[in-house]
């Protein structure tokens, strides 16, 4: 597993000093620990691209170098996920601002290492099943009206660009200032959008220290039944599972190695 013992030990130490509280709703739980997804990507074989070691920016790249996650704290969207076009599949991109809950984002990055479903799911069905209200403009809102999901243009169509925004209470309208936002371009595979949405609407609480939420007045926090060690054990088990999934995906790829020429024959190298 590419995540080394020292990195796991540091993650464990950070968990032990704080008491976990079950925090709901998820969209207001706050950023959490970004190592949920950076450790996950490393476990799946992603590596840090060479860059200025003194720069706060960095890029993680997939083993095939076709997908990357760029961290830029100078940008309003800290995390930029990009996939290059492959064969008959177009490239796509998604971006996430600072306070997107790490566990929700990690659900998406984890899914990059599993085969897509045979049929694309419908994120709107996921939202409706979770009792999110869909208005006549095609905007879906959480039950507390503090998070919205909308396509651009504002109607339900397959080629829409998706925007998801959590916000504070508005003063002159239904929405206030943005707390965090996520954007998926129109080429993003629907199953990946649906995975993010599924994690967003999940009512299972996220673990946060007391008071460390995006909006303390609008969240519920109760002492978690989970211990810090259980959180660390679950994190480590997930990394091992991702590492195994990545190895299995690598074995599923067709063998493109060129067979050696038969004895007695020579080959002329191609010139570019």
Image: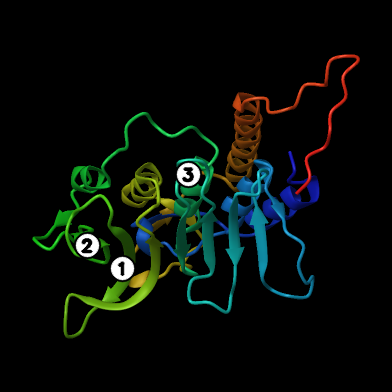
Label 1: which residue? 218
Residue at 64% x, 47% y is: 62
Q: Tell which tag, 3 or 1, sits nearer the viewer.
A: 1
Q: Secondary structure at mark 2?
A: loop
Q: Secondary structure at mark 1?
A: helix
Residue at 66% x, 56% y is: 60
> Which sits earlier in the primary sequence, circle 3 or circle 1?
1
Label 2: which residue? 144
Q: Going by the picture, which residue comes out furthest to the left?
A: 136
Instruction: Reply above or below: 6 against 111.
Output: below
Q: Going by the picture, which residue comes out furthest to the right?
A: 264
Q: Quadrant of the N terminus?
A: top right
Checking the image for residue 268, the label placed there is none
Image position of 199 (left or right of 254) = left
Image position of 260 (left or right of 252) = right
Checking the image for residue 225, the label placed there is 3
- Disc 3 and disc 1 in contact, CB within 8 angstroms: no
Measure how far apart labels 1 and 2 are at the Cα level.
9 Å
Measure how far apart labels 3 and 1 are at the Cα level.
22 Å
Residue 61 location, x and y as percent? 65, 53
Residue 116 location, x and y as percent? 43, 34
Q: Secondary structure at mark 3?
A: loop
For residue 219, which quarter of the picture?
A: bottom left
Measure how far apart labels 2 and 3 are at the Cα level.
25 Å
Residue at 35% x, 75% y is: 178
Residue at 34% x, 50% y is: 197
């Amino acid at each position: 597993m590419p995540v080394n013992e020292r990195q796991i030990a540091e993650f464990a130490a950070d968990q032990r000093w704080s008491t976990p509280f079950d925090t709901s709703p998820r969209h207001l739980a706050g950023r959490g620990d970004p190592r949920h997804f950076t450790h996950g990507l490393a476990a799946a074989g992603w590596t840090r691209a060479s860059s200025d070691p003194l720069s706060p920016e960095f890029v993680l790249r997939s083993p095939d170098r076709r997908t990357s996650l760029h961290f830029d704290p100078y940008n309003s969207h800290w995390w930029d996920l990009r996939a290059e076009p492959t064969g008959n599949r177009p490239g796509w991109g998604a971006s996430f601002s600072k306070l997107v809950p790490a566990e929700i984002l990690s659900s998406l990055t984890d899914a990059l290492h599993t085969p897509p479903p045979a049929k694309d799911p419908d994120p709107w069905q996921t939202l409706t099943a979770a009792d999110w209200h869909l208005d006549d403009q095609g905007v879906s809102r959480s039950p507390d009206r503090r998070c919205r999901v909308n396509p651009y243009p504002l109607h339900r169509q397959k080629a829409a660009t998706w925007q998801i925004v959590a916000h504070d209470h508005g003063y002159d309208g239904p929405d206030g200032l943005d707390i965090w936002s996520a954007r998926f371009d129109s080429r993003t595979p629907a199953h990946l959008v649906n995975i993010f949405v599924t994690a967003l609407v999940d009512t299972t609480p996220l673990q946060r220290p007391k008071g460390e939420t995006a909006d303390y007045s609008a969240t519920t926090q109760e002492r978690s039944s989970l211990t810090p060690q259980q959180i660390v054990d679950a994190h480590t088990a997930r990394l091992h599972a991702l590492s195994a999934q990545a190895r299995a995906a690598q074995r599923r790829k067709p063998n493109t190695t060129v067979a050696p020429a038969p004895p007695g024959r020579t080959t002329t190298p191609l010139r570019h």
